[in-house]
């Protein structure tokens, strides 16, 4: 079955620690995205990548970092510089020409205390 | 600034009722508009995609309309069922390669 996987589903960290969220897709999509979702707000774009070894900042990139070493993988690191990291994180992918048809993973809920 | 607003934020109706969810956008130069469904603690699933040249799209009991001139879209759900309970999000795409998202409407269908 083709799809997107995110792991873990729940993640707990202490303040001051960096944490990496995993995202893998087997849809052969070139583009991948990371979103943050907070209660009462729409999805906000953190980073996106259209090709291996290249990525662009979204609207709220501060305190986050990404890498795209393989087409299938787009991990997100939440650094200690992120002021309010507790949120639900969603990864998505799409083909290049139909960027709006995004397929989503199940999400990772990160809690930082 | 490109913004998308969804009203109401939450809606609770008895099973069997027809209902309408609303989405408005500030910049009418859209490429297309989508409605997504999100179950609690899960990812999103696309329900309907309306291209800027279209007026509506239908899938089963769902019908989405688009009025670019007024900056509005509606999602009509006929004969609602408890399984329709979820959060419904509207997303608008422009030519700048990004989706602009509404905050969603949380729908509860009471048996």
Image (cartoon, grey):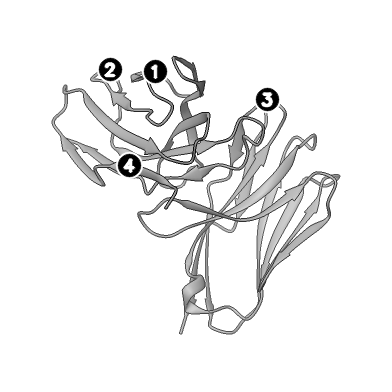
Give the residue pinned by disc 4: A6
Are the residues under marks 2 and 3 on the same chain? no
Q: Is residue B43 above or below residue B62?
A: above
Alpha carbon distance from label 1 to label 3? 21 Å
Q: Are marks 2 and 1 in contact (CB under 8 Å)?
A: yes
**x then y, percent, for residue A27:** 48, 41
Q: Which residue is depicted at the point 33% across and 28% down?
A: A75
Give the residue pinned by disc 3: B96
**x then y, percent, for residue A17:** 16, 23
Which circle's residue, 2 or 1, is located before the other in the chain?
Answer: 1
- Residue at mark 1: chain: A
**x then y, percent, for residue A19:** 22, 27
Q: Are marks 1 and 3 in contact (CB under 8 Å)?
A: no
Label 2: element kind: loop
Which circle's residue, 4 or 1, is located before the other in the chain?
Answer: 4
Alpha carbon distance from label 3 to label 4? 27 Å
Does B111 sit left or right of B52 as displayed?
left
- Residue at mark 2: chain: A
Does B89 sit left or right of A11 as displayed?
right
- Residue at mark 3: chain: B
Give the residue pinned by disc 2: A81
Are the residues under marks 4 and 1 on the same chain? yes
Label 3: element kind: loop
Alpha carbon distance from label 2 to label 4? 23 Å
Q: Are marks 2 and 3 in contact (CB under 8 Å)?
A: no
Q: Is residue B16 above or below residue A104?
A: below
Q: Is residue A14 above or below residue B67?
A: above
Crowdedness near tag 3: few (<14), some (14–19) or many (≥20) residues, C-alpha within 10 Å: few
């Amino acid at each position: 079955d083709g799809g997107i996987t995110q792991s873990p589903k729940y993640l707990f960290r202490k303040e001051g620690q960096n944490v990496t969220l995993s995202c893998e897709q087997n849809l052969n999509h070139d583009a991948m995205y990371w979103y943050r979702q907070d209660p009462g707000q729409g999805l906000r774009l953190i980073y996106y990548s259209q090709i291996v070894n290249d990525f662009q900042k979204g609207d709220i990139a501060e305190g986050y970092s990404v890498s795209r070493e393989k087409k299938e993988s787009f991990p997100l690191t939440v650094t200690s510089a992120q002021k309010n990291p507790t949120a639900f994180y969603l990864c998505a992918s799409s083909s290049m020409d139909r960027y709006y048809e995004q397929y989503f993973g199940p999400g990772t809920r990160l809690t930082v205390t | 600034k490109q913004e998308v607003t969804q009203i109401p934020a939450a809606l609770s109706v008895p099973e069997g009722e027809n209902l309408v969810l609303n989405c408005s956008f500030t910049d009418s130069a859209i490429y297309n508009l989508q409605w997504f469904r999100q179950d609690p603690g899960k990812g999103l699933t696309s329900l309907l995609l309306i291209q800027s040249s279209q007026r509506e799209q239908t899938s089963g009991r769902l019908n989405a309309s688009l009025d670019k001139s007024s900056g509005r879209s509606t999602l009509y759900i006929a004969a609602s069922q408890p399984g329709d309970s979820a959060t419904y999000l509207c997303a608008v795409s422009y030519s700048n390669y990004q989706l602009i998202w509404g905050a969603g409407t949380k729908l509860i269908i009471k048996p």
